[in-house]
Amino acid sequence: MKRFHLIACGATFDFFHRGHKEFLRFALLHGEKLLLGLTSDSYVSQKKPTVAESYEKRKEAVEEFLRLEGVFERVEIAPIDSIYIPKYWEDRDIEAMVVTEDSKGGATLVQEKRKSEGKKELEILLFPFVPAADGSLISSTRIRNGEIDRDGNLWIRPDWERDQQVLPENVRSRFKQPLGNTYTKTEDIVSDTKGKTLVTVGDVTTKLFYETEELPYLAVVDFIVERKKKYRSLNELGIPESVESLKIDNPAGTLSPLLFTAFRTILQKSPEGKRFVIQVNGEEDLAALPAILAAPLGFVICYGQPGKGTVVVPVTEQIKERVFQLVSLLQSQKGG
């Protein structure tokens, strides 16, 4: 027997993740029926402009989960445009409301409104947030920022920031496959990246963008082209002194712990109005991989493919998963 017959909650469920699933399970553990108010596109555009997905896409993800759980018939979903219970549900005999720490304030306002209208107050059920692998919360914001996947796993593992990762000979061929579309013409590259937040890896690629109006937010260079020293300074690549510079040691065929940390620190903070360059002492031949893992969704990573052209990689959850699997093939060297 459930504690309540009818309970209600409001949510956005952008990038539907494990925390959302546990929230719904919690609600249905306590109530036989659930009224789920899903924030409308108009509400999101005014109150939560960072939300990436449409109402229909968010609703579809919820419904798919409910079907898999075998509880689809117990949940009624409708759009909401405020924190209050919509008029079409006001006459329903709602007994309780499920909230999180973030929505407790809204629940208080709902209670005050009901009290002023002479309606009975609802019982409040507080759902605890679900932690990610690092102990911090699983959230849509962290997924959009490129920190975690939808199950709360970190895209950059802690041991990668502790030990040097070395490319074994037997898997080198797998790392040569382009991760995105490859272009040879500058106009095609610029067209495909216009208006995007860019990370460039490699001297030729970086120089190409600094000669256009599409300047990279972060560039990675080593002054080497095709294994030979070609440049001596950032100025030769067109990078002005105003760009904040960081120097990191990274031998060829490896990924150093500091490189992972630098990408994570720079890309997941994304301070507006600033640009960065990482100068690698050694080679940046694998640096596109941690760049993709650290970058927020929607960023674009551009790197050179020897003898092929420039590879343009839009950062998506799917490409992060592919790169995560590749980096997992590297061998750790303790204390690298």
Image (cartoon, rainbow, N blue to C red):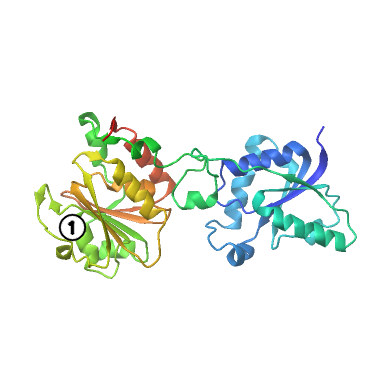
Q: Nearer the viewer, residue 260 or 22?
A: 260
Q: Can I make out residue 78 in this image?
A: no
Where is 320 relative to 296, above or below? Answer: above
Q: Residue furthest top?
A: 170
Q: Quadrant of the C terminus?
A: top left
At horizontal 32% and vertical 63% (from top left) the residue drawn is 275
Residue 164 appears in the picture as rendered: yes
Residue toward you, 157 or 89: 157
Q: Residue at x 38, y 56 (%)?
A: 299
Q: Residue furthest right?
A: 118
Q: Residues within 10 Å of mark 1 (few under 14, many from 20)?
A: some
Say what amino acid the circle numbered 1 marks. Answer: Val
Residue extending farthest to the front is 335
Q: Position of residue 212 (x, y in %)?
A: 25, 69
Q: Nearer the viewer, residue 163 or 153?
A: 163
Residue displayed at 30% across by 44% down: 258
In percent of width and height, residue 88 lies at 80, 59
Q: Is residue 88 left or right of residue 286?
A: right
Examine the rendered structure and indicate whether residue 269 appears above or below residue 317.
below
Give coordinates of residue 30: x percent, y percent.
76, 38
Please state the total of marks drawn on the protein image: 1
> Quarter-wise, where is residue 38 in the image?
bottom right
Please give the name of the residue rendered at 49% of the width and 50% of the height, measured from the top-left corner.
Answer: 142
Q: Mark 1 falls on what kind of element?
A: helix
Q: Taking 18 as reference, is 10 above or below it?
A: below
What residue is disc 1 on? Answer: 204
